[in-house]
Image (cartoon, grey):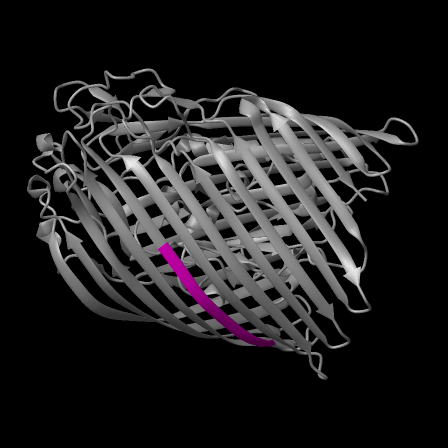
Amino acid sequence: MTDQASIRRISYFSLGLLALLASAPSYGADGGVEEIIVSAQKRDGRLTDTPVSVSVVGERWIEDSNLTALPDLAEAVPNLTIFSDFLYNSTITMRGVGSYSRNIGFDERVSLYLDGIYLGPSYGLNQNLLDLEQVEVLRGPQGTYFGRNAIAGAINLKSKRPGDERVVKGRARYGSHDTLALQGFVSLPLYERWAVSLSAGLQKRDGLTDNLVTGETLGNHDRNAVRAQARYRGPAFEANLSLDRSAANERALIGDPLSDTFGVAPDSFAPAYGEVMFNTSPAQSLEAVGTGLDLEWTLANGGTLTSLTGLRATDAAMKNDTDYSPADLLHVDYEEDYSHFTQELRYASPVGDAFRYVLGASFLDQKALTDRDAIAGGDAMALGMVPGSKVSNVGRVDTTAWGLFASADYDVSEQLTASVGLRWSRDEKSADWMIDGSAAPAFGLATGLVDVKRADEDFSPTVSLTYALSDEISGFARYAEGFKSGGYNLDFVNAGIFPGGIEFDKESARSYEAGLKGAVMGGTLWFSATAFWVDYDDFQVNQFRDLGGGRTAIVIANAAKVRTKGLELETRLAPTEGLDLRAWGAVLDAQYRDFASGGIGGSDVSGNRLEAPEFEAGFALDYSTALSDRLDAFVHLSFSHAGGYFITPDNIKAQQLLGGGTVPFGHIGARDMLSAKLGIASGGGWRVALYGENLLDDRSVSSSLRDFFGTISEVRREGRTVGVELAFEF
């Protein structure tokens, strides 16, 4: 059960918000929250009328705040957690449920889209928020509309299309730790029906951790992104072509060790946080390129036919000093290549009819290649390995996925709308993979080849009722299902589970939601409140399982039943021109209902919590006022709080060392993030501001890791940063 303290928090939060509203009974004529249009059901509709839990972060919010990359959204959206300290562990979690692409045989649970086109594995999380019109965050299973691997939710990034007017804008930031961020956007109309745009971004930052052996710093940022678009608009036809590329090349900090290599004693080489002694520096690189083609025909009857075509390729690589010490024992060298083609074709009936429907089909062809080596160093005789030898796993997974979907809305009366939807999906996977653990007999790793195939079929229905209490307020109740396809654990697996234990089955979810949302007080206040209950069956758990005695196994298994339930609240108040207030909060109860052997030494961890805070809350304020006929002053202030949470099914806060004593592990503490921006702007289109992030200097742990040998390490949040921002638009 959700603890009483969390219930009290959300109650106090709600009461405080109501008190704020009650204290401001009159509003200026220029106030009001603009109407928001979303495409959560594969057609444009008012957010108020959409029977789904959706959070929207718009272009204005992105520009006025300190949001620069996709992971920043976690501080502005309830029940959303994004981890991206290093690429190979990038994770999106919604309502306590998420996953990362630990290997090419394991898929994500939250699907990421750019203009409705699937982006692929979780390496794409470090998306720069370039030229975006808005970000739509859909919580809960989205099987009917988004299909495979949207079992926890979906995020759709909607880019700003080239328009009929010339737009040139840019932003430059410089701040603590030599942080440099540059963004630019140009949109130009061409001829009568054509327009093009180009956007680019660059992020750099010094590393914050010193490697005392090599003299390098770890944890630096070196990322860039570019996107080009071309748009054609005719009387009944529109075409949008986009090309994008993003890249990163960094010395990643995967973990600052708290223990020695084998988890026997506390780290004695560089025990202070911010200092490590690795004989080689960890590194990561990423290059992702893609193209998307969006074609839309408006037919004579008012219906629309839409085609979405995507091509993407992602190359990711990582190196890590796996012994986390100055000794030259073992390091890993990983490379993954993903490429996929997607096609979606759908027809949407005319909007004004009492009976409306959408029919569609989708196709995905994805190829994933892996080449992973664990390479013995000069001191590897201590591990029973010959220096220079290596443990390898190499192979590929081919995935083909088809989907057919249909949805219908019927206006039973002026106030009541009934909606139904269904998607049939079929996923086919083939794996051709090899592991060779013979060079390290002491590790007990597998050696052999697999050439296997599997297929999953699924029917994902959605049923909802929407009742309009007024033109501006509606309530909804929704039932939905979703699934995550099965796969293969293509990692450094133990001989005991090879080959029969590397395959796992699909998981499924059943979701129940009810909510109320809309605008009140003359449109000056918009609100959304949602209660949800989701049951997951055959839940796939991916973990470094502690077998006891310092032994570790990399396991993926259908090991648990999971239930998540809770409440979400979002509000936005715009009482007068120049003032915009937002507040949000969430309570979450996410538990393993049945996980009989998922803990240390195969212990029963049923009833333990998943990896998500029980309580979150935050607010944001944007205010601007005229200083003169030509100058305005503006301020942005935002704060977010998230409670602590466990990161392993064992729900522990400390790891027992083999030599006695403990070190912190397994729990992420509560975070409190305060950011601000203060500046002046001219009517001519320029602005200058001072900004600050993490102004409370929260340096709590952001990730905690137990690696293969039993090493315990952690990464903490970057402390307070300040800087200056220059921006222009004309």
**Residue 4, located in which quarter of the rendered image?**
top left
- 343 relative to 201 in the view: left or right: left
Count of marks, rendered view: 0
Residue 308 percent coordinates (x, y): 56, 70
Residue 486 appears anywhere in the view: no
727 lies above or below 541: above
Query: Where does the N terminus fall, quadrant-wise?
Result: top left
> Which portion, as a residue range, is magenta?
337-347
Residue 182 percent coordinates (x, y): 63, 37
Which of the two residues, 16 or 47, is positioned nearer the viewer here? Answer: 47
- 506 relative to 29 in the view: left or right: left
669 lies above or below 225: above
Residue 361 appears anywhere in the view: yes
Q: Residue at x 73, y 35 (%)?
A: 727
Q: Residue at x 36, y 64 (%)?
A: 367
What is the magenta segment's predominant secondary structure? strand
220 lies above or below 475: above
